[in-house]
Image: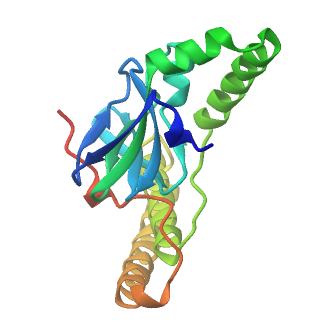
């Protein structure tokens, strides 16, 4: 028996760029990627922080459905995708019928996963991911420079950061030029792929 044999699980097709849910929304369904790719990002003020790219067989959106908490991130399709949609009613029914020990175990796992997600750092899976991570580190240093630090430290950091940014820019050019040789799939969606905030 496969998941698709469950009458409560539906297959749905979504076009590229479709926002499936937004950070802060209440959970109405969980999803499993059947084909295509889904990007996950967090919103902080006016910033969007790419977290992960999900592909065939990967589950997402289940925590908000199981424990009725707000969505921790925004999910959208990076390309035309087919997803298994598991409704909140189906999950609630399955949880209600589950053994009390299993329910308690799932609740503990959800709590642990939330703690992991709160400190989640995407792991690079491609050369372009690694370059993107370097760029993020540069942004952290740039924000640090905006704090109250000694002028000589700020000047020294600024000079080195300019050199670092030039190297990262060149690494990105190389990564994009030789994209075909980097056969690993990206784990982190490109910021240019993220949908605009409402």
Residue that appears at 26% across and 47% down: 14
The image shows residue 108, relative to residue 17, as above or below, that is: above
Q: How many marks?
A: 0
Residue 67 visible to the viewer:
no
Residue that appears at 45% across and 41% down: 147
Residue that appears at 54% across and 14% down: 92
The image shows residue 86, relative to residue 176, as above or below, that is: above
Front position in the image: 145 or 27: 27
Front position in the image: 101 or 50: 101
Specify the quadrant that holds the N terminus.
top right
Q: Is residue 78 left or right of residue 110?
A: left
Image quadrant of residue 173? bottom left
Percent coordinates x, y for residue 75 in the rendering? 37, 40
Q: How is the image coloured?
A: rainbow
Percent coordinates x, y for residue 197 in the rendering? 21, 37
Percent coordinates x, y for residue 85 in the rendering? 41, 35
Image quadrant of residue 112? top right
Residue 89 visible to the viewer:
yes
Percent coordinates x, y for residue 19 in the rendering? 26, 40
Q: Is residue 52 left or right of residue 78?
A: right
The image shows residue 37, relative to residue 73, as above or below, that is: below
Q: Is residue 193 left or right of residue 159?
A: left
Front position in the image: 178 or 103: 103
Specify the quadrant that holds the C terminus.
top left
């Amino acid at each position: 028996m496969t998941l698709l044999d469950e009458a409560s699980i539906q297959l749905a097709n979504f076009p590229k760029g479709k926002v499936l849910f937004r950070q802060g929304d209440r959970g109405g369904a969980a999803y499993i990627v059947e084909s295509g790719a889904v990007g996950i990002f967090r919103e902080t003020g006016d910033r969007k922080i790419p977290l992960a790219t999900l592909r065939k067989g990967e589950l997402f959106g289940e925590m908000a459905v199981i424990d009725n908490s707000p969505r921790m991130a925004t999910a959208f399709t990076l390309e035309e995708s087919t997803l298994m949609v598991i409704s909140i009613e189906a999950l609630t029914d399955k949880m209600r019928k589950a053994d009390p020990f299993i329910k308690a175990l799932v609740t503990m796992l959800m709590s642990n996963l939330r703690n992991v997600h709160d400190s989640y750092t995407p792991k690079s899976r491609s050369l372009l991911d690694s370059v993107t991570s370097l760029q993020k580190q540069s942004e952290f240093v740039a924000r640090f420079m905006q704090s109250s630090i000694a002028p000589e430290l700020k000047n020294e950091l600024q000079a080195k950061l300019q050199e670092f940014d030039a190297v990262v820019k060149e690494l990105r050019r190389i990564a994009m030029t030789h994209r075909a040789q980097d056969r690993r799939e990206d784990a982190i969606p490109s910021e240019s792929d993220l949908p605009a905030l409402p």
